[in-house]
Amino acid sequence: MDDPDAKKKASGMRSAERLLVVLRALNIRNGATVLELNRDTGISRQAIYRILETLQNFGYVRRQDATDRFHLTHLVRRLSAGFKDEEWITDIAAPVLERLVKEVVWPTELAVFSDNAMYIRESTRWRSPFTIDRVTVGQRLPMVASASGRAYLAYCSENERKTILDNLSASEDPFDRLVHRKGYVERALEETRSRGWATGDESFRLHPKTETLAVPILVAGEARAVLPLTYIASAVTAEQIAERHLTQLQSAAREIGTKVQMMQSRDDVANMDAEITPLREAG
C-alpha cells in the first residue's frame, strides 16, 4: 500500500529542488524570461510560473514588465547572511557601541535593514543615563519616516533603493504610504546626503519626547547598517547634536564598516580557497 505521507514528503522535496534550480539559473543569467528558464532547467513553464510567483510574493524576485524578464532582488543575499550578521554585530559593532556611549552619553543603537524596514539589533539604552523610553532590541523602524530608514535609503545602492521603494508603495502601513507624496522621498534623501546625517519625519517618534539622528555604516561604499543616536528633544536640537557628536558617530560608523569589509574579504578568500582546493587535488 502506498504511503501518502511519503508521497507528500517526496513531492515537497522535488518542489524545493526546483525552486533552488530556478534561483541558481536566475543568478547565472542575471535575469531571465520564463522560456529561457525552461530551456536552462528543463522544468516546465507552468511549474516555473508557480515558482516565480512564490519568489515574488516573498520579495526575492521582481518582474521587469518592459522585457518580461525576472530578476533576483537584494533580499536573496539575506538567505545566507544570518550567521554572518550575528557574527559582525556581536564581535564588531557591540564593542564599538559600548565605547561610543561613554563618549556621547546619549543612547546609541545599531539598526539593520530587513523585510522593508529597519530593526534595532544592538542598543546601549541600558547604559545611558539619558534614556527615558523602553525601546528594546527588535524594535521595527519604518523606512521613510524614521531617521534610520532615511540614512539607509540615502546611501544604499540605487537598485536596492528602487526595490525597497517599490515594495513600500504597495504597503498599507501609514508610514510607508509617505512614498506616495510627490517629491517627499527625494527631498528627504537629498537633505540627508547634503548633511551626512538623517532625522525622521515629525509624525514618527519612538517616544513623544525623543528624536533621533542617524548616520550610515558603509561597506564598500554602500549602506550595510545604520548608527542612530536618540536624544531628548526639549534638551537639544538635531543641529546641536550634529555639532557636538557627528564626528564621533561617523568615526564609529567608519570603524564598524571597515572591520566588516575586512571580515568579508577574509571570508571571500576562504570561500575561494574552498572552491579551488578540489580542483588542485584533481589536477
Image (spheres, rainbow, N blue to C red):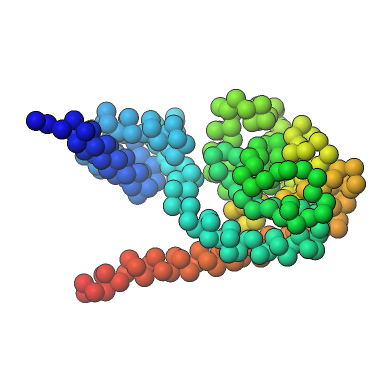
Q: Residue furthest right?
A: 235
Residue 84 x %, y %? 49, 58
Residue 91 x %, y %? 58, 64
> Residue drawn at (53%, 55%), measured in percent from left and top?
85
**With respect to residue 36, does 222 lie above or below?**
below
The C terminus - image quarter? bottom left
> Quick check: 121 left or right of 204?
left
> Quick check: 111 left or right of 81?
right
**With respect to residue 115, does 241 lie above or below?**
below
> Residue drawn at (66%, 40%), measured in percent from left and top?
141
Where on the picture, by quarter, is residue 115?
top right
Where on the picture, by quarter, is residue 161?
top right
For this rendering, which residue is in front, 8 or 115? 8
**With respect to residue 77, does 162 lie above or below?**
above
> Residue drawn at (25%, 40%), measured in percent from left and top?
13
> Residue drawn at (9%, 30%), measured in percent from left and top?
1
For this rendering, which residue is in front, 234 or 250? 234
